Image: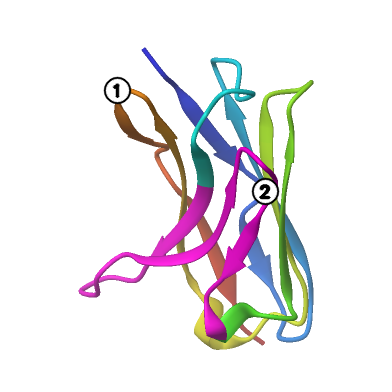
Amino acid sequence: QVQLVESGGGLVHPGGSLRLSCAASISIINLHAMGWYRQAPGKERELVARIDNAGNTMYADPVKGRFTISRDNARNTLDLQMNSLKPEDTDVYYCYVVRWDGDYWGQGTQVIVSS
């Protein structure tokens, strides 16, 4: 069983920064990919950033240049550094991993960007 636990969400002013972290209960070295999605009430879940097992990254256009995804294979964690946050970044952020037997998701962490 794969367990993913997100942390680091909270309330931040526009222009501020937050760092989300996702701790995996398994070794992440051989995972196909890991990433972050976000979802607002009544909206579809959307991909924010993704990193594969070769370290290749991709970002959604709205977050390019502001967010950075990284993985620490020794600690089995996935991080998302979010800078220059905007009110439209307010969402629940979910960590996910892709393993040989399917996709696994965390429970989500709330990010609120508001003055």
As drawn, 107 above or below 51: above
Q: Confirm whether the magenta stretch covers residue 70.
A: no
- Residue lying at 64% horizontally and 67% vertically, measured from the top left: 11
**Residue to which mark 2 is pinned:** 8
Of tags 1 and 2, the one toward the viewer is 1
- Residue lying at 56% horizontally and 39% vertically, measured from the top left: 6
Name the quarter where the C terminus is drawn: bottom right
As drawn, 79 above or below 11: above
In front of the other: 44 or 73: 73
| Magenta segment | 35-61
Q: Residue furthest front?
A: 54
Q: Amino acid at mark 2?
A: Gly
Q: Position of residue 98 (x, y in %)?
A: 41, 36
> How crowded is the residue under tag 1: few (<14 C-alpha within 10 Å), some, or many (20+)?
few
Mark 2: which secondary structure? loop
Mark 1–mark 2 distance (CA, rounded to whole Å): 28 Å
Q: Earlier in the sequence, mark 1 or mark 2?
A: 2
Q: Is residue 2 left or right of residue 109?
A: left
Label total for image: 2
- Residue lying at 31% horizontally and 65% vertically, measured from the top left: 45
Q: Amino acid at mark 1?
A: Asp
Name the quarter where the N terminus is drawn: top left
**Residue to which mark 1 is pinned:** 101
